[in-house]
Amino acid sequence: MKIMITGADGFAASRIIRAWQDRHEITGTTRSLLDFTDRDGTGRKIRELSPELVIHCGAVSDLAVCDREPESSRKVNVEGAENVAAACRESGSRMVLFSTDQVYFGGGVQGPHHEEEPLSPRRLYGKQKREAEERCRKVLPDVVILRMSWMFDYDKNRPGEHDTLVTSVRQALREGSRMQYPVYDFRSITYVGEMIRHLEKAIHLPGGIYNFGSPNEKSTYEVAEELLRLLGYGAELLVPNREAFADKPRDLRLSQDKLLSFGIRFGNTQEGLEACLLHENISKSNLYADFC
Ligand SMILES: NC(=O)c1ccc[n+]([C@@H]2O[C@H](COP(=O)([O-])OP(=O)(O)OC[C@H]3O[C@@H](n4cnc5c(N)ncnc54)[C@H](OP(=O)(O)O)[C@@H]3O)[C@@H](O)[C@H]2O)c1
C-alpha cells in the first residue's frame, strides 16, 4: 500500500515506519518535509504523493506543553488534523487519525470507556484531540479514529524521544533511584509493538471511532510493580504515590468491545509487558549486562 505517515520522527510513527518499510511503500513526513499547520502546503504534499492512506500521528502530545502553549498546540492538534483531513478528501486518500484515551479524562463516567459515551475532557490536550476528532469526521466522514492509550517500548529510538513506562523504570534501575507511581490511576497501557501489529488490520476498518489499546485492571503502581518483577527486581525502589488523583481515582481504561466485534483483540497490559520483554530477549543474564 502507498502510505504517508505524519510525525515521522515521533514515538509511534518512527516505529510504524520501521516495522512496515519492507511491506508498504511508505513516506514519513517530518516537520521539515511538511508542516501540516500550513493548509495549502499540506494539500500540495498529499496531492504530490497521492497516498492511498495517510496515518496522522503528528501532534503536540505532551499535556504540559499544551497547557503552556494553548494557541500553538491548538494549531497543531486541531487545525493541523483538519488540514490533513481536508487534503485527504481532495486527494481521495483514506485517513487514520491517532487520538487519545485522554478524551475520557474528566467525563465522570467510570471505565472501561466506550466510544459512544459523552465526553467532557478536563485537560486541554484531551479537549483539543476531541475537537480534532469532530472536525476530521465532519470533513472526512469515513476517517478511522483510533483512541490510543499510553504506549511503551523497551528502548528509545533516538536520544530526544519521550520516555515510556518501561524506559523510565529502566533508567531508574540504572541510576538506583526511587520511582513513584500513582495507586489511584487506572489506564490501558499498551506495548507499541502490539499496537502496530493490530494497526495493519485497523487501517481497513469502516470509518468511525475505535478504542485502541490493551485492557488493564491494575493501577499504574501495580503495573510498575509487575514490570519490576518481570525484569527480575523487587519493589524496593518503588514508592506508592497516594496523592495523585486521591480525591477521585483517574480511570482511563478502554473498553475493547467494539474492536473485538471487528476481530481485533489486544492482550492485557501484563501480556504486553511480557511480549515486549520477550521481543527484546530479556533474560536474567543480559539484565546484568544492562544494569550492572
Ligand atoms: N505515545 C503515546 O503513548 C500516545 C498515547 C495516546 C495518544 N497518542 C497519540 O498518538 C500520536 C503519536 O504520538 P507520539 O507519542 O508518537 O507523539 P510524539 O512522539 O510527540 O511525536 C509527534 C510528532 O509530531 C511532530 N509534529 C508536531 N507538530 C508538527 C507540525 N506542525 N508539522 C509536522 N510535524 C509536527 C513532532 O515533530 P517535532 O518533534 O518537530 O515537534 C513529532 O515528531 C499523537 O497523536 C498522540 O496524541 C500517543
Image (spheres, rainbow, N blue to C red):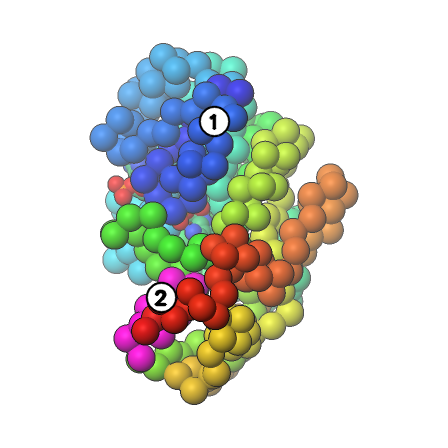
* View extreme (front): residue: 285
Q: Is 108 or 28 nearer to us in this picture?
A: 28
Q: Quadrant of residue 176?
A: bottom left
> Ligand 1, what quadrant?
top left
Q: Does the stretch in magenta take in 168?
A: yes
Could you tell whether 275 is left or right of 285 in the image? Answer: right
Residue 221 visible in this rendered orientation of the protein: no
Q: Quadrant of residue 32?
A: top left
How far across and down, in percent of the image, does residue 86 sit? 44, 23
Q: Badge 2 is on which residue? A: 290
Q: Badge 1 is on which residue? A: 22
Q: Residue at x 41, y 31 (%)?
A: 5
Q: Does the stretch in magenta take in 8?
A: no
Establish if 85 lies above or below 65: above
Residue 143 visible in this rendered orientation of the protein: yes
**Mark 2: amino acid:** Asp
Q: Is 167 or 127 nearer to us in this picture?
A: 167
> Which one is earlier in the sequence, the residue at label 2 or at label 1?
1
Establish if 47 lies above or below 107: above
How far across and down, in percent of the image, does residue 99 sit? 49, 45
Total labels drawn: 2
Quarter of the image with the C terminus is bottom left
Secondary structure of the residue carrying tag 2 is helix
**Mark 1: amino acid:** Asp
Q: Residue at x 36, y 74 (%)?
A: 173
Q: Is 118 or 259 nearer to us in this picture?
A: 259
State yes or no: discs 2 and 1 in contact (Cβ < 8 Å): no
Bounds of the magenta span?
166-176
Could you tell whether 282 is left or right of 264 in the image? Answer: left
Q: Residues within 10 Å of mark 1 (few under 14, many from 20)?
A: few
